[in-house]
Amino acid sequence: AEDTFWIGSQAEGMGSVSGWLARSQVVKQDIWVARLARPKKGPGAWELQDRSRQQIGEETYSYVVMAHNGKCADRLIKTAPMRTDAHAPLRCKFTAEPSASQTDRLELSSLWVCVLAVPVGAA
């Protein structure tokens, strides 16, 4: 059996893969979710909540996909009312230098970028 091979498109890059996977799904984007909660409506469902613990929309979800890494994803998964398989991989910490030994957390560092514009003919 041949292994599955994923590749993006020239026009959209790797974004075409997520677009293809989501094409038959209802996708809600650009919504700030502060908490994950288990509603009283039924077992196995998730509801999304805002900062004041009010449900966002009327839907509940069987699955929640976090398209975010780092401290925001770590903070969001910590609001889940029970341990999930996603807790451990999302643990992270900020550090100026990589740890000397192996760590069980994703290490995040600030990235500083300097952009310099030089007039044509000045160099």
Image: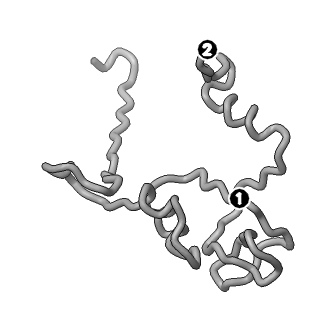
Q: Residue furthest left?
A: 100
The residue at which mark 1 appears reads as 63
Residue 9: where, in percent of width, then height? 67, 19
Residue 30 lies in quadrant: bottom right
Mark 2 neighbour density, 10 Å: few (under 14) some (14–19) many (20 or more): few
Instruction: Give the amino acid at mark 2.
Output: Glu
Q: CA distance from mark 1 to mark 2?
A: 29 Å
Left or right: where 119 falls relative to 72: left
Q: Residue at 34% x, 47% y: name it.
A: 111
Compare residues 123 and 106 and report the one nearer the observer.
106
Mark 2: secondary structure: loop
Mark 1 neighbour density, 10 Å: few (under 14) some (14–19) many (20 or more): few
Q: Residue at 62% x, 21% y: name it.
A: 4
In this rendering, the count of numbered labels is: 2
> Tags 1 and 2 in contact by the CB under 8 Å rule?
no
Residue 77: where, in percent of width, then height? 53, 67
Residue 68: where, in percent of width, then height? 55, 53
- The mark nearer the N terminus, 1 or 2, is 2
Residue 44 lies in quadrant: bottom right
Mark 1: secondary structure: loop
Residue 10: where, in percent of width, then height? 65, 16
Instruction: Give the amino acid at mark 1.
Output: Tyr
Mark number, residue 2: 2
Task: Tell me the quarter of the image containing the C terminus.
Answer: top left
